[in-house]
Image: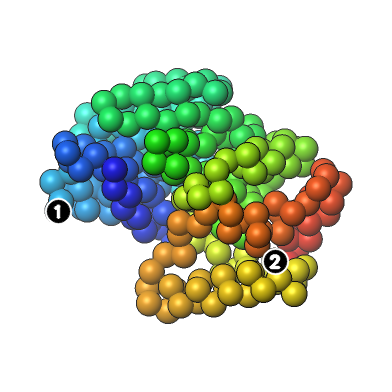
Amino acid sequence: MKIEIIKCLQDNYSYLIIDKKSNEACVIDPSEADPVIDFCEENKIKIKYILNTHHHYDHVGGNKEIKEFYNSKILGFEHDKNRIPEIDILLKDQEVWKKNNFEAKIFHIPGHTTGHICYYFFNEKILFTGDTLFSLGCGKIFEGTYAQMFNSLRLFKSFPLDTKIYCGHEYTLQNSKFCLEHDPKNKMLINKILKIKENLSQGNPTLPSTIEDELNCNIFLKANDVESFSKLRDLKDNF
């Protein structure tokens, strides 16, 4: 499998998971259709499946057009069936979804929204976290509770350390400023910020990150209880 990062809108990322043998692909959270279709047509890739982490428009905006162009199937959480446009396949928490050479385990991770899920391609150790876990940050709590978000983030701590994380937005540099404010002596964080700035200066994404990097550097994953997490989340909202 090969992962291609497609820049969309202002700071969104969509991701292509490409089966190099067949040149068929899944696309994660296509916020808009044109950049995804342009890349696929240039590289003769056919999108078989559209995988949505949650219903927000900047993650599903390209669903309908891509589906019509490639006759793709759209996947999402079963409880978001009325919120994800054009959805075909309803996924359950803890389900293993497998089609052709694509295989992922689904985890329900509420907090940002009540129906948010992530896709863990466990054979490749690749995790698509949408707007729940960002590199050096976490999503805002729009529909869920602090406890739900805290538990969703705690789930990620159980994944293998070398799991690669692909999230929904390029927020890493801005997130790093908040982490540094609250963890100023963290040498691993300081070194990571240098790499972040180098990547951005070259026009490259700061992703993927890894579970190990996030455990070492992400201040939200260092919170030991809901109370301390809630305080951090409130501070970040006003940072």
Q: Viewed as shown, does residue 45 lie left or right of 123? A: left
**Residue type (three-letter) at the residue carrying disc 1:** Glu
**Residue type (three-letter) at the residue carrying disc 2:** Cys
Secondary structure under tag 2 reads helix
CA neighbours of label 2 inside 10 A, class few (<14), some (14 to 19), many (20+): many
- Which x, y percent locates residue 5? 35, 55
Up-down relation of residue 198 to residue 149 (above or below)? below
Q: Quadrant of the C terminus?
A: bottom right
Residue 115 in view of the camera: no
Of 68 and 94, nearer the camera is: 94
Residue at the image position 36 percent from the left and 58 percent from the top: 7
Name the outermost residue toward the right.
227
Q: Tell me the CA gap for discs 2 and 1.
A: 39 Å
Residue at the image position 42 percent from the left and 79 percent from the top: 201
Q: Which mark is residue 42?
A: 1
Q: Which mark is residue 179?
A: 2
Residue at the image position 42 percent from the left and 31 percent from the top: 104
Of 98 and 25, nearer the camera is: 98
Residue at the image position 78 percent from the left and 61 percent from the top: 235
Name the outermost residue toward the front.
161
Q: Quadrant of residue 75?
A: top left
Up-down relation of residue 165 to residue 158 (above or below)? below
Of 13 and 190, nearer the camera is: 190
Q: Viewed as shown, does residue 122 lie left or right of 50? A: right
Q: Quadrant of the N terminus?
A: top left
- Which x, y percent locates residue 63? 35, 37
Q: Are marks 2 and 1 in contact (CB under 8 Å)?
A: no
Image coloring type: rainbow
Which is more foreground, mark 2 or mark 1? 2
Secondary structure under tag 1 reads helix
